[in-house]
Amino acid sequence: MRFRSRPLAFYLHSAILTAAIVALTIVVFSAYLTTRSILRSNIQKEAELLTESILQRVTVVEQAVVTIAANMATALEEMAVTNDEHDSYLKKIVSENPELYGVAIAVAPKSYEPSDECYARYCFRKDESLIQYADLTDSSIDIRIEDWFQIAALTQKPIWLEPYYGQAGGALMTSYCQPFRVPGRWDLYGVIVIDVSLESLSRLVSGIQILEHGYGFLVTSTGTIFVHPVKDFIMNQTLFTLAAERNDAMVEELGHRMLQGERGHLFVEKDIHRPESQVSYAPFQHAPWSLGLVLPLSELNSDLNKLNQDIVLLGLAGLGILFLIIRRLSQKMTRPLVQLTATAELLGRGDLQSVIPKLKTGDEFETLSQAFQNMQAELRDYIHQLTESTAAKERLENELRIARDIQMSIIPKSFPAFPDREDMDIYADIRPAKAVGGDLYDFFFIDDDLLAFTLGDVSGKGVPASLFMAVTRTLFHASCQSDQPVNILIEKMNEALCADNDASMFVTLFAGILNLKTGELSYCNAGHNPPVLMRKGAEPVWVDDKHGLPLGVMDGFGYDLSTMILQKGDQLFLYSDGVTEAENIDKDLFEEGRLIETLRNLKEKNDPETQINQVFEAVARFVGEAEQSDDITMLSLEYFGQENLNTEAVVAKEKEFAFRNELEELNSLSEKLEELGDEWELPMPVVMNLNLALEELITNTIFYGIQDDQPHTISVKFSLTENALNIEIRDDGIEFNPLQLPDPDLEIAAEERQIGGLGIYLVKQVMDRFEYSREEPYNIVTLTKKL
Amino acid sequence: MNINESIVGDVRLVELDGRLDTVTAPDFQQKLLATVADGNGKYLVDCAKLSYISSSGLRVFLMGLKKVKAGGGKFVLCALQESIAEIFEIAGFSKLFTIAANQDEALAQLK
């Protein structure tokens, strides 16, 4: 039997076997009781029969003794037997009555004739056949004072004497004493004594064996035990002395009943003296004695126990057979279940082709098997459908994955992004919460000096957000080509995004354009989280200017912009709300405070990549086991400034020239530059670029910076370092920052091009650094040209 | 700065030699504007010997171009030295002007 079907068989077994055991117990117990009562009743009947039979036999003897004595008395009273004939008469009586041991005639003196001597003749059996005569008068005993004579004489009635041990051979004897009268008178003449041996009675009673230890006993009218299996009791104990000795009320009760000549039974419970038993008692018909039979009921129990044992054994055998039958039956019943279970397991493992046993039992198992077949068929259909829908889902997921790959491919992912640039470092990373997210970042150079960057967060997630993000990013990229202020770019993007925004999506966006030459950062925040500005050596601060609504919300919205100048070592940190709204399992948010704290704690190494990775780690630590709830995107920008061009490196050579504020000085300028180029072995294109830049700047100063008619000096100081040429131009004209001039629009047609405004632009282009400062009363322009 | 003007076929040719800077630009401006005064002809400026140019020079070229475009003529430059071409490129002028590699090519284009 397989293990998994055990419970059913187990319950079947236990239920039926329990019922069978209970029934068996009831049967055994009631059989026990019935059998016991039958056995007891039988043994009681047996005892009664035995009693009857013993008493009958005793009565025959008694009757004979009584009759003989009566006849003798009659014969003597009527003088049918004379004194001379006494011996022969006695002999005749003894010889004719074998049950008699001896017979005596005792004549009391003066009872008949006052002169008469005491007279007693006794004839008895000795050695079976010989009959002896004894003359009791020979003895010294006066028979008249003997108890038996006195009692018989006084009561004038026959009496049975208490048993006694006779002189001849010590046998147990009793005597029957019959008084007789003087012939023709009422006076007592003598007493006839008939001796009876009690040996045969004793043997008879002693020979009684009821069961194993059952026995008979006899007591006299005084309760003296004279027949009993225990020899010590005989003639030594009465029932009462025995009772007193043993403190046994039952024996005393028995004694009273037997002495009163009652007939009946006494049930004796098991106690310290004996096992459970019953005493039957009955009186003799003539003698004042009583017969008792002890029935050892407990011995019935051994038979009973044996019987019970047999019944129990039979019952156990029956149980065994029952068990085998049940087992067989349960196996037969559960075999289909086992088969169906095995099939169900196969089904569970996905084996939908397994053959389900077709049961034709016509019972519930057939129905179950049918149900299994139906289930299998339906499962097959279902799995088939599921497989198809799963395949469709996988296709969709695959497409989403591709969408994500495309999305990731359109944002710059390789770092360092601009390994050639020494004036800035930028790093960004995005970790989408779902496969396709709505965060975006982007950065690229519009031209050599202008770095455009943005970070945004599209409302929602999934493919629509991703598409919206892609559109936003594309718009930003396209708009930045046109060289317009960043707020104008944002406005254009907003209009484009509003135009076809059926899904009512929007994007919060921070966009900035950093001029790496000047460090000027112009930026526009359209509803996005405020970035963090980390000035070198200062605490991080929020850049919390706001310039308008998120893009895609309101068509035609006008956006502002802000500007700031970044110094060497300044950093700007952009992020999406996935950072500040990262949730831990307690639904607490990471929040701006922790972000600032994390950024503040960055000590030694705080380059953009380290910075972003540290913030990611801090967020991950905070979030713990909780699932990432939103895209997390960060972008960090560090501005090294132009000084990274090693302008402060050891100056190898220096030269200073002074020019007047006259245009003719430009000829001198070109000559001096040629000389300097020769002297310092500068490449020709560099010399040309220097000439161009200085000409433009000096011209500017002459035309616009110096507004009086006084002569002024414009000093130009050259210094050569290992890899760069630095030029400082100093004039004392009015304060004028050439960097403030707008760049010309290079895209428009010739007809619309302004004639002016090209000079400063050319300087910016041909030089690697262009800075302006005012140290009253001087305008100081610093240029650097990498070599 | 030498400015040599001649006529090749129906093309008015201006050949520049030297530096075109703030100092020399006014002279070139005057001559060029005079040359393109009609604005409806064919004009070629040969820059083969132009060794330097600043924004003042560029400005003059732009003025000439505007004039010719307004008049419906053709204005072509040729044979720019590498450093000059670079400045043109930076200033966005290479998109505005028709620039030929040498004089023959320029003349062919003007036909």
Image: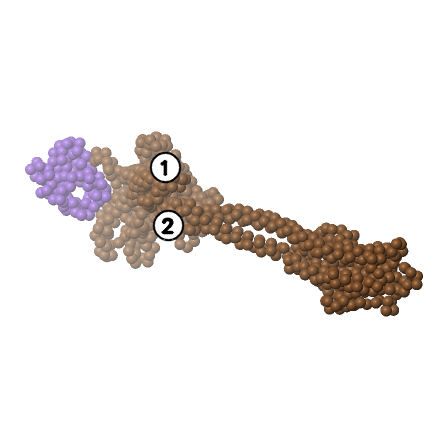
Say which residue appears at 24% left-offset and 48% top-offset. A689
In this view, the residue in front, A714 or A429, is A429
Does residue A233 sit above or below B65 in this rendering?
Answer: below
Residue A473 in the image, given as x and y percentages of width and height: 31, 40
- Work out whether A242 lies above or below A487: below
Which one is nearer the viewer's eye here, A542 or A378? Answer: A378
Q: Could you say which is closer to the camera, residue A263 or residue A239?
A: A263
Q: Disc 2 designates what residue?
A: A608
Give the chain letter for brown: A
Q: Which mark is residue A507?
A: 1
Residue at the spot x=60%, y=56% of the render? A303
**Nearest to N terminus: mark 2 or mark 1:** 1
Is residue A40 positioned above or below A102 on the image? above
Would residue A655 be seen by someone viewing this image from the given angle? no
As drawn, the label of residue A174 is none
Where residue A165 appears, x then y in whole percent?
78, 65
Residue A159 x/y as whole percent:
82, 57
Is A180 displayed left or right of B55 in the figure?
right
Give the foreground label among 2 and 1.
1
* Kind of residue at badge 2: Pro
Query: What chain does mark 1 sit on?
Result: A
The reply, left or right, for residue A279 in relation to residue A186 is left
Q: Quadrant of residue A306?
A: bottom right
Q: Secondary structure at mark 1?
A: strand
Q: Colour of chain B?
A: purple
- Residue drawn 75% across the image and 56% down it: A64
Q: Classify mark 1: residues with Cα within 10 Å, few (<14), some (14-19) or many (20+).
A: many
Residue A62 is left or right of residue A147, and the answer is: left
